[in-house]
Amino acid sequence: MTHLLLLGSTGSIGTQTLDLVRSSGGALTVAGLAAGRSWEALRDQAREFRPRFVALADEAAAVRLAPELPRGTELLAGPDAAARLAREASYDTCVHGMVGAAGLLPSVAVLERGKTLALANKESLVAAGELLMRLAAEHGATLVPVDSEHSAVFQCLRGEDLGRVRKVWLTASGGPFRTLPAAALEAVTPAMALAHPNWEMGPRITVGSATLMNKALEVIEVHHIFGLERERIDVVIHPQSIVHSMVEFVDGSVIAQLGPPDMRGPIWYALNHPDRAPANLVGFDLARFSTLTFEAPDLERFPALALGFRCVEEGADAGCVLNAADEVAVAAFLAGELDFRDIQRVNARVLDQRPGRAGSLAELLAADARARELARAEVSAAAAS
């Protein structure tokens, strides 16, 4: 039996993980659940799974949740509740599906305890990848990526020597605007950007798929998880989202991991790693797999992608700053305060102003805060122009 801690339990990764818990026949149990502000959904989850702890970041929502919890479930509340939960609960594996840089401190807490971190919170690795990988090594923790692309690379590299890798190919769907005339991108609305053709994801990630910033961040993640330099990382557009990523070896062989666009597969793999457990998940599907196409990304249409490679080359706090700026810019876009094309412009301008320091957690948190200030100023300037 594996005891799970689930961060971001009411989001897409969280609800799909709980579907897998339900189908596990008791092999998976829930030790703790954490959410941001969705107290009613968290209440229903707590009543079903009876965890020892639940955590809610929004303190006002926590006041409403407290009297609704089942007997024996303890509530942690406040912005640091998820990190406290990661430090205090008794669990084997943490599935981390929170969105945003707020997920960094919980990631640190899990790794410092030497637990298995099934990580879907890409912002942790983007902002502090070198730190997290060092913590995992120091504390004997295991980091298993849950993002479909990184899970694919992780599986393709199983048992392989990284020295034999010629290149990792990250696949990208191209999002909803892959064929939209470039001139029309100026008129893109939030509703248009949130209409992803293949995946159901949270708003920040969905907008990132539309700009290709999500893939830029994944380039940084690959660099940190697998220790690969920029020259051995590339991106290819694959509209069907069936090939989740590929690894090309020095002898020209290419190994790919395929599956339907369904996050339950990567989650299930992470929950059972290093084993593979039977699951009632779709494998080869002739109707879906019959046509697979690939094309080069259009960097003029999607200039955000280049920022990810820039961060790999520059290192230090570059990824941290880029992620913080993008969180602010995407929030402004979704609120109608920023044009779609201005998201990338804000990100590039903030990245140009980064302090260039990193190493300690304190330095990274300071860089994150400063980048957000700069991004808000850039958003205001764009709105006034």
Image (cartoon, rainbow, N blue to C red):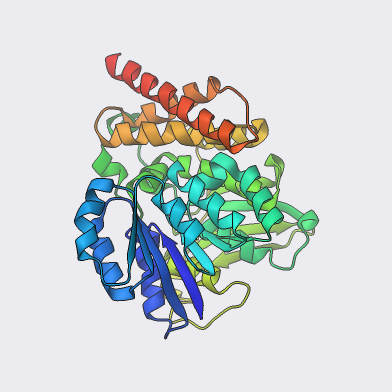
Residue 245: % across, % down: 57, 58
Residue 362: % across, % down: 57, 34
x 50%, y 46%: residue: 105
Residue 315: % across, % down: 65, 33
Residue 123: % across, % down: 49, 45
Residue extending furthest bottom? 25
x 47%, y 69%: residue: 4
Q: Report the number of numbered marks.
A: 0
x 44%, y 31%: residue: 325
- Residue 226 vs 369, above or below: the answer is below
Task: Please identify the quadrant where the C terminus is shown.
Answer: top left
- Residue 354 vs 65, above or below: the answer is above
- Residue 7 vs 217, above or below: the answer is below
- Name the image quarter holding residue 179: top left
Q: Is residue 83 visible?
A: yes
Q: Would residue 229 be found to the left or right of residue 342 on screen? A: right
x 40%, y 36%: residue: 327
Q: Is residue 302 visible?
A: no
Q: Nearer the viewer, residue 98 or 211?
A: 98
Q: Nearer the viewer, residue 301 or 216?
A: 216
- Residue 278 vs 41, above or below: the answer is below
